[in-house]
């Protein structure tokens, strides 16, 4: 007990010595509950939330950035590069993934509704949902949104090794451009329900003009320093693949033959009588 008292007295003496040397120093009572120290215990689950916020960033800023990129894909500015204007070496996969997923269901559902509306009121027609259209649309859209950027990235990387002045994009930046360029097809696919072929082709031309402009204005600066023929061939290939996707989706999911539901065994009464007499 005496040893403890001596230790406390020594600590008090050291504190008094320091205070005498520096009269303006501030003392703290460690028993004061208002005093907080650096390492306080965190409530359960707070560590995980902080790590998620560090990885994902601010939700408000992320959503604003995604909306800005969507608006940029719908209103391309002539002479402006989509990557430099909106992505700024900060590509995201959140927007492209959900744009592609939404487009898959928009095409599949709208295609089913279009087929139903075309044959509505026909006695011989029985509506059967075509669920396989979802898987087909998903395969086509995601293959286009990932494989084409992969091939383009490899090609630009190869050409950049030959022409050092070419602009280089990362794979994720190219995926981001392709993903956001497809957003215009979501409202277009919904409007494709209108059973008028002329209206559908007008809509697809508008969508092609908007989304194709985003692709051309983004990738032309990357290849214009290359050989003239190679640069033009690259841009033409990008546009042709985009046209193939648009026209293929319209032709397969919406422009189905109107009489494909009629069974082949149906015959007219005159044909039945003629067949009976001949027998």
Image (cartoon, helix red, strand yellow):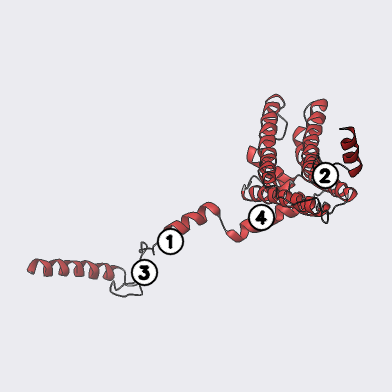
What residue is pinned by disc 1? 46
How far apart are the two marked residues, 2 and 3, measured between alpha carbons?
A: 70 Å
> What mark, if any, has residue 255 been given in the picture?
2
- Quadrant the N terminus occupies: bottom left
First in sequence, mark 4 or 1: give its number: 1
What residue is pinned by disc 3? 36
Mark 2 vs mark 3: give the one in front: 2
- Quadrant the C terminus occupies: top right
> Do labels 1 and 3 touch, CB within 8 Å?
no
Q: Nearer the viewer, residue 200 or 196?
A: 196
- Residue 161, quarter of picture: top right
What residue is pinned by disc 4? 65
Mark 1 vs mark 3: give the one in front: 1
Residue at the image point whose x is 77% and y is 54% from the top:
190
- Residue 274, quarter of picture: top right
How far apart are the two marked residues, 1 and 2, measured between alpha carbons?
A: 54 Å
Mark 2 vs mark 4: give the one in front: 2
Does the image show residue 224?
no
How far apart are the two marked residues, 4 and 1, measured between alpha carbons?
A: 26 Å
Residue 89 spot, x, y in % from top left? 64, 44
Residue 212 spot, x, y in % from top left? 80, 42
The single residue placed furthest to the top in the displayed view is 162
Pointer 1: residues within 10 angstroms few (<14), some, or many (20+)?
A: few
Pointer 2: residues within 10 angstroms few (<14), some, or many (20+)?
A: some
First in sequence, mark 1 or 3: give its number: 3
> Do labels 1 and 2 touch, CB within 8 Å?
no
- Secondary structure under badge 4? helix
Residue at the image point whose x is 7% and y is 69% from the top:
2
- Secondary structure under badge 2? loop
Q: Is residue 252 above or below residue 232?
A: below
């Amino acid at each position: 007990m005496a040893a403890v008292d001596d230790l406390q007295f020594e600590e008090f003496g050291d504190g008094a010595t320091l205070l005498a040397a520096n009269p303006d120093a501030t003392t703290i009572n460690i028993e004061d509950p208002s005093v907080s120290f650096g390492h306080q215990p965190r409530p359960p689950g707070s560590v995980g939330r902080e790590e998620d916020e560090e990885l994902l960033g601010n939700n408000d800023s992320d959503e604003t950035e995604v909306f800005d990129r969507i608006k940029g894909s719908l209103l391309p500015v002539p002479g402006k590069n989509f990557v430099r204007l909106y992505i700024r070496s900060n590509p995201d996969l959140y927007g492209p993934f959900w744009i592609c997923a939404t487009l898959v269901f928009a095409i599949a559902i709208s295609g089913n509704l279009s087929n139903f509306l075309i044959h509505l009121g026909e006695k011989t027609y029985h509506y059967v949902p075509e669920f396989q259209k979802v898987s087909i649309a998903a395969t086509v859209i995601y293959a286009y949104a990932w494989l084409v950027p992969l091939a383009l990235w490899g090609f630009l990387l190869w050409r950049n090794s030959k022409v050092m002045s070419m602009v280089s994009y990362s794979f994720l930046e190219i995926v981001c451009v392709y993903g956001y360029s497809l957003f215009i097809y979501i409202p277009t696919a919904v409007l494709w329900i209108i059973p008028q072929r002329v209206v559908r082709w007008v809509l697809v031309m508008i969508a092609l003009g908007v989304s194709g402009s985003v692709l051309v204005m983004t990738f032309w600066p990357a290849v214009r320093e290359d050989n003239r023929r190679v640069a033009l061939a690259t841009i033409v290939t990008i546009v042709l693949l985009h046209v193939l996707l648009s026209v293929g989706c319209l032709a397969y999911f919406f422009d189905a033959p109107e009489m494909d539901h009629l069974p082949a065994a149906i015959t007219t009464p005159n044909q039945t009588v003629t067949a009976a007499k001949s027998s």
